[in-house]
Amino acid sequence: MPLLFLDRVRRADDYPWLAWKVRFFAAGAALALGGIMLQIDWIVMLATGILVAGFFLRFLPSGKGVTDHGRDEENSPTTNDH
């Protein structure tokens, strides 16, 4: 799917797992960089696991974050313009 057609309806305030995804990313990135600098493989593998766990947060219930708050009233099928 081209970037032009991505869904831009998702709002951060409607996404309950956003804070946890950011925490997982920050922890995973810090551990990965530290493990690479220290050349310790198990730290890099742990960081990879944390990053993968953060990715799987998107599949938790109510993880879509898309609501109908942004619908226009005039485009609603319930309005009558007679």
Image (cartoon, rainbow, N blue to C red):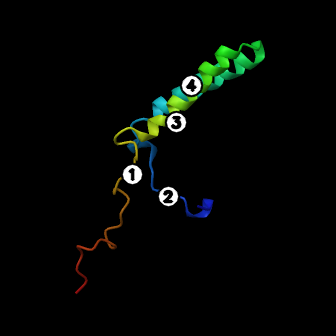
Residue plotted at (25% across, 83% down): 81
Mark 2: secondary structure: loop
Q: CA distance from mark 3 to mark 2?
A: 18 Å
Q: Residue 79 appears at what percent x and percent y?
A: 24, 75
Label 1 crowd (10 A; few <14 / some 14-19 / many >=20): some
Q: Element at badge 1?
A: loop
Q: Is mark 3 in CB contact (under 8 Å) with mark 2?
A: no
Tell me if mark 4 has few (under 14), some (14-19) or many (20+) residues whose alpha carbon lies within 10 angstroms of its own. Answer: some
Q: Which residue is mark 1?
A: 66
Which image quarter holds the N terminus?
Answer: bottom right
- The residue positioned farthest toward the bottom in the image shown: 82
Looking at the image, tell me whether mark 1 or mark 4 is earlier in sequence order. Answer: 4
Q: Position of residue 62 (x, y in %)?
A: 34, 42
Q: Earlier in the sequence, mark 3 or mark 1?
A: 3
Q: Which quadrant does the C terminus fall into?
A: bottom left
Q: Which residue is mark 4?
A: 49
Q: Closer to us: mark 3 or mark 1?
A: 3
Mark 3 or mark 2, which has the lower sequence index?
2
Q: Is residue 68 above or below residue 35?
A: below
Mark sitting earlier along the chain (4/3)? 4
Secondary-structure class at tag 3 = helix
What amino acid is at disc 1? Val
From the viewer's perspective, tell me whether residue 74 is left or right of residue 79. Answer: right
What amino acid is labelled 4 in the image? Gly
Say which mark, if any, is on residue 7. Answer: 2
Q: CA distance from mark 2 to mark 4?
A: 28 Å
Mark 4 residue element? helix
- The structure residue drawn at horizontal position 38% and vertical position 59%, both measured from the top left corner, is 70
Q: Which residue is mark 3?
A: 55
Judged by depth in the image, the label closer to the viewer, 1 or 4, is 4
User: Mark 1 and mark 2 in contact (Cβ < 8 Å)?
Assistant: yes
In this rendered view, identify the residue nearer to me: 74 or 40: 40
